[in-house]
Amino acid sequence: FLAERAAMSVENIALYDNLKQSMMATLMSLVSAIEAKDAYTQQHSTRVTAYALKIASSLGCPYDDLQRLETTAPLHDIGKIGIADRILNKVNPLTEEEYRQIEAHPLIGENIVSPLGLEPDELAIIKHHHERWDGGGYPHGLSQENIPRLARILAVADAFDAMNSDRAYRRARPFDDSMQELKNNRGTQFDPEIVDTALQVLARDENES
């Protein structure tokens, strides 16, 4: 009886893992679909994930946190599937209403991935990656240590790649300008410690490329 129960438990775990992997693959296909609609942001999620993992590793984050980032960071912008293309690809400045719609994408993303059964810490990465160190971000205006650390790491990686890539409304900023912008926003938009580490990681990558 115990052997049968153990076998059933193992089988259920395997089925759950297979289901979760299938759902993750589906969500990653959605991410690819979002990026394919905009040539300016293709592979953005892949690059941001790579940056975030390198920064987190340099900060000494434990293995479990690196796994959380690796799972969740590729999905950080999945909520943009709920934002109209005319807003995402708009060349001219956004209106106040359009900007409010953009600000909704972290919450939309959280709702999309919730059925995966992700841990609260993983959902928080998606939900809070646009919060600011000074409390001026969204969706909840969290500040400093109240922002989950992994979300703070992702915020820096996301901002750097956004600046260092072509966008619909502007060309990519030079590497040095993007680095300077991180410095300029150290302690206001971004966690100072994470910026300091990111600057070292990004400079090392640039020198090695």
Image: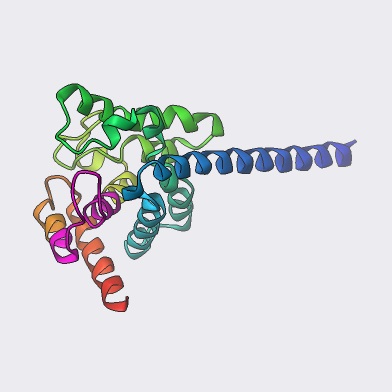
Residue 35: image quadrant is top left
Image height of 116 relative to 40, above or below: above
Q: Quadrant of the N terminus?
A: top right
Viewer-nearest residue: 65 or 165: 165
Q: Is residue 164 above or below residue 127?
A: below
Position of 141 relative to 49 (above/below): above
The segment highlighted magenta reads 156-179
Residue at the spot 23% in from the left edge and 57% down from the top edge:
164
Which residue, as the protein is rendered here, is positioned at the far right?
1
The figure's colour scheme reads rainbow
Q: Is residue 80 left or right of residue 17?
A: left
Q: Which residue appears at 51% of the width and 37% of the height? A: 118
Q: Residue furthest top?
A: 97
Number of marks in the rendered image = 0
Residue at the extreme left of the image, as rendered? 184
Q: Position of residue 144 (x, y in %)?
A: 20, 42
Residue 170 lies, in percent from the top left, at 18, 49
Is 100 included in the stretch rendered in magenta?
Answer: no
The residue shown at (42%, 54%) is 46
Q: Position of residue 157 (x, y in %)?
A: 29, 54
Q: Quadrant of the C terminus?
A: bottom left
Q: Is residue 166 magenta?
A: yes
Give me the residue at 21% from left, 56% from top: 172
Q: Nearer the viewer, residue 150 or 89?
A: 89
List x then y, in percent, for residue 106.
34, 33
